[in-house]
Image (tube, rainbow, N blue to C red):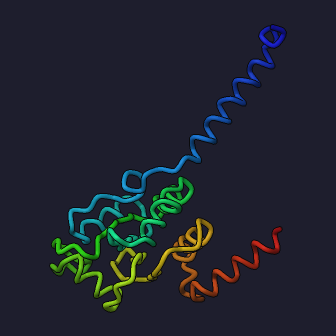
Amino acid sequence: MIFNKNPIFRVFLSLSLVLAFGISYAAEPRDPARFFYEQTLGDLTDDLQDAKDNGKIGVLIFFQQEECPFCHRMKTTILNQVVVQDYYLKRFLILELDIESAGELVDFDGNTTTMKKYFSKITNNKGATPVFAFFDLNGKLITRYTGASSGVDEFMWLGEYVSQKIYKKMTFSRYKRVKRREQRAAR
């Protein structure tokens, strides 16, 4: 073949194939249970120390329940996306807790409770899921977001909102409006 004799073409073709397969592979969804959440032994003080030791800016707890369709949607359309996983894992230690579990938990203050009671405390006894609760490195709740996000963009904005401390300046609803205006202006 004529193409086999041209070394420049072969290099170009090889690089193109590597890039094409690399990009498509990187975009493949990944199971959040394996690639997003950290394992916890039920002691949030230990998890908080892990976050500090690993240079994270905080802890994100994803409160969910098995039969929640919105939790399922988050797991299968947003939390499984590589861009989401990479962004959040770089900044937060991420835990998943089942709100219906009676499993023992040591909270950030060192108090022993259950996952169910801790969820009630964090959400003021509201049972809606999913809930994304962001804590600073002192174990203080800084942002709580209830419900499924509308998509990857909105969930990424939530990460920016917390990691860039925009919560000190405005509500997340207002921040989303700003981001949507920016998106429309860029089109």
Considering every residue shown, the one lying at the far bottom of the view is 124
Q: In the rendering, at what x and y percent does residue 120 appear?
A: 28, 86
Q: Residue at x 40, y 71 (%)?
A: 60
Quarter of the picture containing the C terminus is bottom right
Q: Quadrant of residue 110?
A: bottom left
Q: In the rendering, at what x and y percent does residue 7 appear?
A: 78, 14
Q: Quadrant of residue 9?
A: top right
Q: Please tell me which residue lies in front, 185 or 101.
A: 101
Q: Is residue 18 above or below residue 101?
A: above
Q: How many marks?
A: 0
Task: Look at the image and tell me whether residue 133 can be seen.
Answer: no
Q: Residue at x 37, y 55 (%)?
A: 33
Q: Quadrant of residue 38?
A: bottom left
Q: Please tell me which residue lies in front, 23 or 59.
A: 23
Task: Look at the image and tell me whether residue 71 can be seen.
Answer: yes
Q: In the rendering, at what x and y percent does residue 167 appear?
A: 54, 84
Q: In the rendering, at what x and y percent does residue 44 appear?
A: 26, 71
Q: Residue at x 53, y 70 (%)?
A: 159
Quarter of the picture containing the N terminus is top right
